[in-house]
Amino acid sequence: MTEYIEETKSVIQSDINAADLRWSLFVAASKSYRYDSAVRPFPSEFIRKTDNEKDIEALRQTIEDVIPFQLFLKDDFCLKDMSAASVKLLHWVLLSDSVILQSMPKQEFETIQKITSQSSLTPSPSHIFKVNCKLGAQQFQQNCIGKKTFFAFHGSSLQNFHSILNNGLIAHLNKVS
């Protein structure tokens, strides 16, 4: 358990905004009435052995036990104050193998505006995050060879972004357009 605690605490301390965003997206997905498609992947610790069904109530209760991230930065609070299940869940969400979120400086917005050909009238965001995909980036680069590419924006409900970050955009789940 000590290894989980140290790794999780290290991720939070190294980039608290990115860790908070990632956790918030997971929580939003789990609170959705469409949690079955929004929480993908679903933590295996919360799949009941008896009937192989997702135990969303146990997951939601475990989420409630996670202390606010700001407290991790204070010496008198730490992950040791949380249940083992909460520590494991937080570790699972923040240290996923598929994607890394990284806070970027606000000056990066100018670069984003240039590559997307957006006007300077666009209001500057309060936070900018970079998504680093561990597995799909190389394959995407290979698929781009000899093809014209462009940047685009994707809008979706908050509850969908945990799944999008971990699985990419899945066209057959889009029921609007």
Image (cartoon, rainbow, N blue to C red):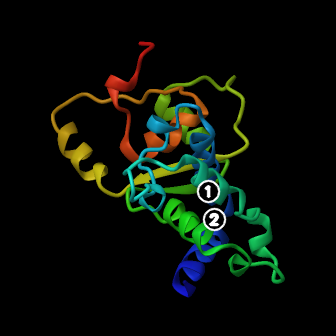
Q: Return the x and y of residue 59 as percentages of the image width and height.
A: 58, 54
Q: Are marks 2 and 1 in contact (CB under 8 Å)?
A: yes
Measured as percent of width and height from the top left, residue 2 is found at: 57, 87
22, 87: nearer the viewer? 87
Query: Is the residue marked by circle 2 packed among few (<14), some (14-19), or many (20+) residues within 10 Å?
Result: few
Q: Is residue 131 visible?
A: yes
Q: Which mark is residue 134?
A: none
Judged left or right of residue 136, residue 156 is: right
In front of the other: 120 or 86: 86
Q: CA distance from mark 2 to mark 1?
A: 6 Å
Residue that carries the numbered disc 1 in the rendered image: 18
Please, which residue is most extreme toward the left here? 146
SS assignment at label 2: loop
Q: Quadrant of residue 48?
A: bottom left
Q: What numbered label is drawn on residue 15?
A: 2
Callout 1 amino acid: Ala
Query: With respect to residue 145, does 53 lie above or below?
Result: below
Quadrant assignment, res 152: top left
Name the residue at 63% across, 51% down.
60
Q: Residue at x 39, y 62 (%)?
A: 97
Q: Is residue 86 left or right of residue 35?
A: right
